[in-house]
Image (tube, grey):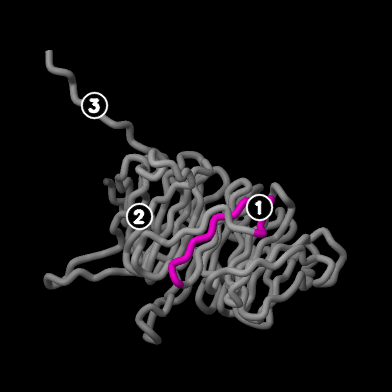
Amino acid sequence: MTVAPPSSTGRELSDPPTDGVSNIRFSNHSDHLLVSSWDKSVRLYDASADVLRGKFMHGGAVLDCCFHDDSSGFTASLDHTVRRLVFNYNKEDILGRHDAPVRCIEYSYITGQVITGSWDKTLKCWDPRGASGQERSLIGTYTQPERVYSMSLVGNRLVVATAGRHVNVYDLRNLSQPEQRRESSLKYQTRCVRCYPNGTGYALSSVEGRVAMEFFDLSEAGQSKKYAFKCHRKTEAGKDIVYPVNAIAFHPIYGTFATGGCDGYVNVWDGDNKKRLYQYPKYPTSIAALSFSRDGRLLAIASSYTYEDGDKPHALDAIFVRSVNEVEVKPKPKVLPNPAV
């Protein structure tokens, strides 16, 4: 495992949010970066050029955001609204509403639909191509066992993690029933779920310094591959200090992944070989969110206190963008022992 030299926290973007960062997402088409925040804003950056291209204010804190294409995106807000933003025209409209804050939002490039997860214990599916008006754009509402905390999409598969350690796996072509109803294999509250880029499973992190690697294949052989590991911990004066793991981001080329914790560290892991590949220098405060660019050349890191220790003095919220070296994210080949002669 390699530790990066001290200068490689990356370049700090100018004009960051003024309150907690809830999510950051790179575009699938460019180095544009969408950032949602508790300061009620959504910011659009050109991450390569460090240019703020747009800023949209909402009626409440913005809890999640995603791109539609390079000219538009969608947001999930504490004020119960689901919004569409059109960047070039600085326009927005309300796609619809939940009965409680909207925590998660995803756009499916396969179905052309927007999926939202809320603390009202429902998923909703929207057609953004429909005429304006909530009734015309809402496709369906699907009850969840608890409040939705995190969601991830790969191909036609949607993974929904809720309070109470529930995990529902859906096929987007039939959202009426989960394909699989699961319970988190971790004992404590789920913080983040992210699907593997190859579509075979998902990684799930908890508030208690652990990540579980799960697989969709329910056969005995498929389930034998799953495991969990400890991370984002330290020992001080003989005591184990454990930090929440807030963020997971998969490298789009190599399938390795980064985790970010309340310890201010970002670690890169090779899940197949069960190894830590890299640790970046400590950031000023908790890592709230992570995102790799579409080609894996850039990693965006939100250093933003997540109030795990209550209200206390903390570093200002910041977004760092660092260039990724292949050595940090490429799996190392297994070295086989030489056979005895």
In the displayed structure, does residue 136 sit left or right of residue 125? right
Among the two numbered marks 3 and 1 on one chain, the one whose residue lies closer to the N terminus: 1
**Crowd around label 1: few <14 · some 14–19 · many ≥20 (10 Å):** many
Residue 116 percent location from the top left of the image = 64, 66
> Which mark identifies residue 199?
none
Q: Are marks 3 and 2 in contact (CB under 8 Å)?
A: no
Query: For the magenta stretch, what is the residue range?
Result: 164-176
Whether the magenta-drawn stretch holds residue 165 is answered as yes
Residue matched to label 2: 267
Residue furthest toward the top?
341
What residue is drawn where x is 37% and y is 38%?
331
Task: Identify which amino acid the numbered label 1 is placed on.
Answer: Leu
Residue situated in front as seen by the camera: 109 or 120:
120
In the displayed structure, does residue 167 sit left or right of residue 127? left
Among the two numbered marks 2 and 1 on one chain, the one whose residue lies closer to the N terminus: 1
Residue furthest toward the right?
131
Residue matched to label 3: 336
Front position among marks 3 and 2: 3
Residue matched to label 1: 172
Among the two numbered marks 3 and 2 on one chain, the one whose residue lies closer to the N terminus: 2
Task: Identify which amino acid the numbered label 2 is placed on.
Answer: Asn
